[in-house]
Image (cartoon, rainbow, N blue to C red):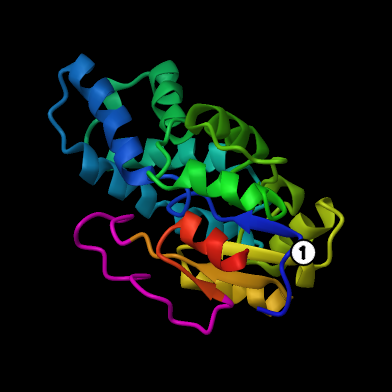
Amino acid sequence: MKARPKAFLFDVFGTVVDWRSGVAFYAERIFAAKGIDFDSAQFADRWRGQYQPAMQRIRDGKRGYVVLDTLHRENLDLLLAETGLEDRFDDDERDELTQAWECLPPWPDSVEGLRKFRELGFIAPCSNGSIRLMIRLARFATLPWDTILGADIAGNYKPQPEVYRKSCSAIGLQPGEVMMIAAHNEDLAAARDVGLMTGFLPRATEHGPGQDADLEATGDWDVIGHSIGDLASRCG
């Protein structure tokens, strides 16, 4: 690591919060109330499976930018149709189910680890989530950000380079003064290409017990740790 960063940007879904168990828990509660027998973890996986394809159309310029909240809602409609559940949810109930993405639990080390990072510099999310979504998720999971950044700032989605550049610019820093922290090697590779420092930690169960990607660092990242707190200690 060249020098201690002045700010730390964090991927959120999968790195700071556990989206899979959070969405599954939320869906299971709603399914139970409606008498629906469907594997909620599979439902979460299939919903998340729509995530990258929906954003890719925007990255490719085939669609103008819309916030992730909108993509989540559209992807839910597709999933309900695929699973034969479309007749079980009206529009208001679909909106309620989409709020699952605002109610995700932090990983056990996240909140305390973020507090440690705040002692080293500014901390903020650099997520594909909208500012609206990041605010609500931060309140639910008690994430102690200094400020809220979102994909809205760039009008695009990671790993497009402008997402990292504009996040740095929004807090008045150059990319070389900032570290990107993520559990995803692809995210870090894109951030490093823009000039950010990089920190990796694995989340071996982000995608459930059969996960086979991002189990270890695949790049020469500046810092590698086993938890957010461990990374903070290494950066300090």
Q: Nearer the viewer, residue 93 or 5?
A: 5
Residue at left offset 46%, top offset 24%: 95
Range shown magenta: 204-222
Regarding residue 206, the answer to whether it shows in the image is yes
Could you tell me residue 37's position as x and y percent?
12, 29
User: Looking at the picture, does residue 229 appear above or below residue 31?
Assistant: below
Secondary structure character of the magenta stretch overall:
loop
The residue wearing badge 1 is 165
Secondary structure of the residue carrying numbered label 1: helix
- Magenta stretch holds residue 50: no
Residue at left offset 70%, top offset 60%: 163
Q: Amino acid at mark 1?
A: Arg
Could you tell me residue 75's position as x and y percent?
42, 42
- Left or right of 85: which side holds 55? right
User: Looking at the picture, does residue 69 appear above or below residue 28?
Assistant: below
- Magenta stretch holds residue 209: yes
User: Looking at the picture, does residue 14 appear above or below residue 176?
Assistant: above
User: Looking at the picture, does residue 108 appear above or below residue 231?
Assistant: above
The quadrant in which the N terminus is found is bottom right
Regarding residue 62, the answer to whether it shows in the image is no
- Left or right of 226: which side holds 121? right
Could you tell me residue 64's position as x and y percent?
68, 51
- Left or right of 220: which side holds 3? right
Could you tell me residue 221's position as x and y percent?
55, 78
Q: Nearer the viewer, residue 101 or 182?
A: 182
